[in-house]
Structure formats: structure tokens, C-alpha cells
Amino acid sequence: MHGYIKFLKGTIAGQTKSASSNRAQDARAAEIELRMAREDRRIVDMGEAVAALDKVTGDFLQSIGGLPARITREPRERQRIEAICDAERLRLSDRFAESAQALRSGLPADQADDEDDA
């Protein structure tokens, strides 16, 4: 009887060690997979993604700001075009900010908007 109890205790201890070892191996495998995904550029660091979005959107908005001067030299027409471009830059700036917030939150853009309203 004592031998059987000792056997059961040894089996339980072995199972516990085995489960711990499996969890550690799984964690190491996940870490390696994550590192490889970064190196293969399948995933990107959040800071890099936000910086890229900021750069592209900033360049785009700046480009829109320069359009009136490129389109006409006539002051009244330039003012009219500037007003149109300014309104569009504001609209796009808001949309780009929403996209950046969605990126940071990990939610689709429409769900990130809902969270801000709550």
C-alpha cells in the first residue's frame, strides 16, 4: 500500500513538472515566433506604425495646403480655393486622427469612435 501511494505521488509530481515544462516551452516558442514575425516584418512596432501614419498624413495635408498657389495666381480665386482646401484639410485631419486612435486602441476605426463617445 505504501508503495502504491509513493507511486501515485511520484506520478502526480511528474505530471506537475511536465505541465510546467510544457508551459515554459510554449512560452519560448511564442517568443521565438513573435521575434521572427518582427524580423519578417509581418508585424510592426506600434511606435513605428504611428510614426509612419503621422508622416504620411502630415505630408498629404501639407500638399493640399500648397494647391491653391499652384492652381492660380489670381487673388480672389486663390482665396476661394484656399477655403475649399482648408475645409478639406480639417476634415481629413480629423479622419487621420481617428485612424491613429484606432491603431493605438487595436479596434476598427468605427469602434474606436464609439469608445470615444462613451
Image: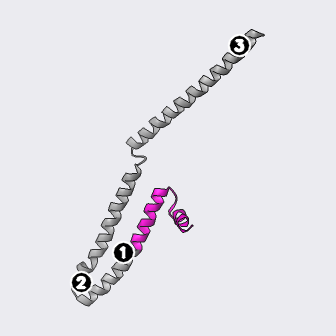
* Residue 64 among magenta residues: no
Q: Position of residue 66 (x, y in %)?
A: 26, 75
Q: Which residues are magenta?
A: 91-118
- Amino acid type assigned to the residue bearing label 1 in the image: Arg
- Between the residue at mark 2 and the residue at mark 1, the CA separation in whole angstroms equals 19 Å
**Residue 45 sits above or below residue 4 on the image:** below
- Image position of 45 (left or right of 10): left
Q: Residue at position x 35%, y 61% from top?
A: 54
In which image quadrant can residue 13 be found?
A: top right
Q: Residue at position x 78%, y 10% from top?
A: 1
**Residue 104 sits above or below residue 8 on the image:** below
Q: Nearer the viewer, mark 3 or mark 2?
A: 3
Residue at numbered disc 2 = 72
Badge 2 vs badge 1, beta-carbon distance below 8 Å: no
- Between the residue at mark 3 and the residue at mark 2, the CA separation in whole angstroms equals 93 Å
Mark 2 vs mark 1: which is more N-terminal? 2
Badge 1 density bin: few <14, some 14–19, many ≥20, Cα 10 Å: some
Badge 3 density bin: few <14, some 14–19, many ≥20, Cα 10 Å: few
- Image position of 59 (left or right of 26): left
- Amino acid type assigned to the residue bearing label 2 in the image: Thr
- Amino acid type assigned to the residue bearing label 3 in the image: Lys
Residue at numbered disc 3 = 6
Q: Name the residue furthest left.
A: 73
Residue at numbered disc 1 = 89
Q: Position of residue 79 (x, y in %)?
A: 29, 86
In which image quadrant can residue 90 be found?
A: bottom left
Mark 1 vs mark 3: which is more N-terminal? 3
Q: Position of residue 96 (x, y in %)?
A: 41, 66
* Residue 100 among magenta residues: yes
